[in-house]
Image: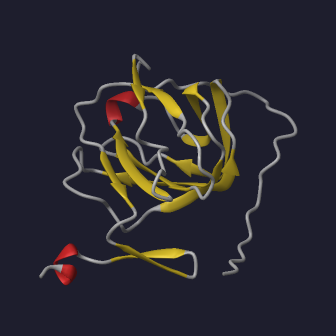
Amino acid sequence: DHYQRYSPYRVVDAVSGETDHPVGTGATVDGLTLDAASGAARTQFIIAESELSGLGHIDALRMTATQAGASLDRLIIRMRNIAATDLAGPVDTGLTTVYDHGVQLVDGVNTLVLTQPFTWAGAGNNILVEMDVEDRTPGAAPTLAASATAHPVVHAEREGHLLFNDGRVGVPASVFAT
């Protein structure tokens, strides 16, 4: 099989000013978000409005790897503004792809410069973040410093999705019920 895709990188030549906006405490370890042991995984979580005060647009995401693990063939990050505070299941519409690259994390802080900035819509909105991992290289999955959350996290292997031309199409589980 041959797949072709264009994957632009943004290059930051100079910074006139930036502000880190920490979310969470990093007091626990998350071994599921980037675990693609079966070849692919999808995780969605919500960053609550209360954690976003003073934020305008997001140009990069930083995450702390407690264990770098194997390289990831492809990490896709999608985001959207959302009023919901809980996830009953995966959200498949309205997501904007902000990052799509292969990546090798390092132990410690990793900065992922977004291909396009994401703008938080402000009061009354939370941010839904989706991380999709495609990994054809065997090896230990990266683990991340994380926080326990009152908001549900949706984590699923790629089951329930069909891949067409590098895009996924949701298929309800009821279609496959016997």
Position of residue 21 relative to residue 133, above or below, is above
User: In this rendering, would 61 be left or right of 43?
Assistant: right
Q: Is residue 80 visible?
A: no
User: Residue 129, image x and y in percent?
Assistant: 43, 48
User: In this rendering, would 150 be left or right of 23?
Assistant: left
Which residue is found at the position 56% from the left and 50% from the top?
118
User: Residue 52, image x and y in percent?
Assistant: 42, 32
Hey, which residue is sitting farthest front in the picture?
138
Quarter of image, res 28: top left
Position of residue 135 relative to residue 65, above or below, is below
What colouring style does the render use? secondary structure
Hey, which residue is sitting farthest right in the picture?
13
User: Residue 149, image x and y in percent?
Assistant: 28, 30
Which residue is found at the position 58% from the left and 55% from the top?
135
User: In this rendering, would 55 be left or right of 59?
Assistant: left
Residue nearest the viewer, comparing 68 with 88: 68
Hey, which residue is sitting farthest left in the picture?
178
Residue nearest the viewer, comparing 83 with 3: 3
Which residue is found at the position 33% from the left and 36% from the top?
48
Residue nearest the viewer, comparing 122 with 65: 65
Q: Is residue 3 visible?
A: yes
